[in-house]
Image: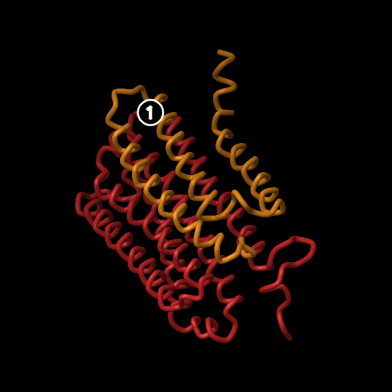
Chain colours: A red, B orange
Amino acid sequence: MEIPYNVEERPDTGMYNAKLGIWLFLASEVMLFGGLFSAYVFLRMGDITGTFATGSSELNVPMATFNTLVLISSSVTMIMSWVSLKLGENKKFKTYLGSTILLAGVFLVVKYFEYSAKFHHGIYPDTSTFFSIYFTLTGLHMVHILGGMVVLFYFLVPGSKMMKTEPERFTNRIETVGLYWHFVDLVWIFLFPILYLL
Amino acid sequence: MSGHSVDDIKKSVKIYIGVFATLAVLTVVTVAASYLNLSNGEAFFLAMIIASVKGTLVAGYFMHLFSERTTILAVLGLTFFFLITLLFLPYITFIDHAVI
């Protein structure tokens, strides 16, 4: 049985089903991270000993700034991979999607060095309320990066067969995974200043 | 966005590059602003303004929200309302403090 509305627009929503699906998923993700941002506000308001100020000063701002630029670049390569498919440039698509995965890998490697430095200095999630929320937020964000990388790799190698058999459906798939990827970038845009700079 | 023509998409590539450059500049501005001699409240307010501008650019252009269907905007509007409610919940703890 064929799944309906995976290319053509559904009359009542005005879009293909996967697009509405990913947006509903992203809405739930907003609330997931929103809950943790709310926890951050709550902990910071109750921080009378100044653990947030001292904890924040122990983080590596240049590394995080570099990672912010890496993630922004990955958003551009992600959207360019979708543009390439729309223009029928399949080779460029693979280059851009591969670059996105590579940049995601760079982000994780930098994060690995950041985490290692913290552990080396005896800083763990139970060190202070600041580091508990720092490791929770950045850890959850990294899980999202990893999940995204798995899906992107699937579309780059095994899932790319659909590019020839059902090009429009494949383009829509890349658009939906792209929406997820930009969301991950969006979350980091807010995480960076509240954890590293304030 | 899926219904856009090839010409529209070619034009939007320039916009994507412009958005990328703006995001990169704003990242540097965010870091530079953190070195200003501001109070905690002012620093938080400034950082959130810059982050919101960056977020709007990503959501508006990369995620195509500026040209998206009303159904999606309605879903996100409702989500945003609950998000703001959630973020301001901790301030309720100050209500009983104000009486003293």
* Amino acid type shown at disc 1: Ala
Quadrant position of the N terminus of chain B in the picture: bottom right
Chain of the residue displaying label 1: B
Percent position of residue B44, x then y: 41, 30
Q: Nearer the viewer, residue B13 or A24?
A: B13
For the point 73% across and 76% down, the residue is: A4
Q: In this view, does A104 lie to the left or right of A112?
A: right
For the point 68% across and 51% down, the residue is: B75
For the point 34% across and 63% down, the residue is: A103
Element type where label 1 sits in the image = helix
Q: Is residue A13 above or below residue B96?
A: below
User: Is residue A74 visible to us here?
Assistant: yes
Q: Nearer the viewer, residue A161 or A191?
A: A161
Percent position of residue A8, x then y: 70, 72
Percent position of residue B2, x then y: 62, 64
Residue furthest front as drawn:
B7
Residue A173 location, quadrant: bottom right
Numbered label tally: 1
Residue furthest right as drawn:
A12
Give the residue pinned by disc 1.
Answer: B43
Pointer 1: residues within 10 angstroms few (<14), some, or many (20+)? some
Quadrant position of the C terminus of chain B in the picture: top right
Q: Which of A132 and A70 is in front in this view?
A: A70
Q: In this view, does B12 lie to the left or right of A62?
A: right
Q: Is residue B21 above or below residue A103?
A: above
User: Is residue A129 visible to us here?
Assistant: no
For the point 47% across and 52% down, the residue is: B15
Q: Which of B28 and A32 is in front in this view?
A: B28
Percent position of residue A114, x then y: 26, 54
